[in-house]
Image (spheres, helix red, strand yellow):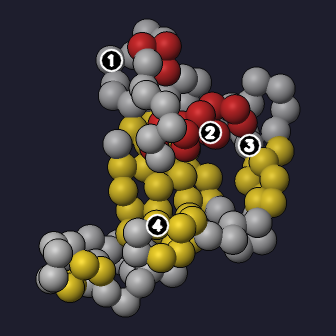
Amino acid sequence: MAIEASCRATGLTTKWGIVRLTSVSLSGFRGYRSEIVVAIDAETTTVIGRNDAGKSSLFEALDIFFGGSKLELSDFTVDSTEPVVISCTFADLPSSVVIDSDRSTTFAAEYLLTNQDQLSLGL
């Protein structure tokens, strides 16, 4: 399945401020049996692909990731025992975050950053 991402990533507002989604990784989700990584750069504005390439699945996976809907049995790849993995990577992170009511820390101090100083979270 080949899809091409090209959407303007202006940022996602979180309780830490605005962060930028830089990639989405899927495996075991619907038609994505093997891992696929969709890079999202600052110039991305659309997702283009032929019919049945997985464009809607990409956005539905993002909806599940961000809590808009729940993973259903039909979301698992047919005839596979592999788990569904949906992960997102973020950049432009805040310099510090408050994890308790009064304790400030950084993602780096909590060993949560990738080698590219990005935050990668998965389901």
Q: Which residue is mark 1?
A: 81
Q: CA distance from mark 4 to mark 3?
A: 27 Å
* Secondary structure beneath label 4: strand
Between discs 4 and 1, the one toward the N terminus: 4
Q: Which residue is mark 4?
A: 14
Closer mark to the observer between disc 4 and disc 2: 4
The image position of residue 82, as x and y in percent, is 34, 25
**What is the number of the mark on residue 3?**
3
Give the amino acid at mark 1: Thr
Q: Relative to residue 78, is residue 46 drawn left or right?
A: right
Residue found farthest to the top: 79
Residue depicted at x 46% and y 66%: 14
Front-most of 92 and 2?
92
Q: Relative to residue 119, is residue 33 drawn left or right?
A: right
Q: Quadrant of residue 118?
A: bottom left
| On screen, residue 94 above or below 64 | below
| On screen, residue 92 above or below 7 | below
Give the amino acid at mark 2: Leu
Residue depicted at x 41% and y 84%: 94
Q: Relative to residue 102, is residue 8 drawn left or right?
A: right
* Secondary structure beneath label 1: loop
Task: Quadrant for the C terminus, please.
Answer: top left
Residue depicted at x 61% and y 52%: 38
Between discs 1 and 2, the one toward the N terminus: 2
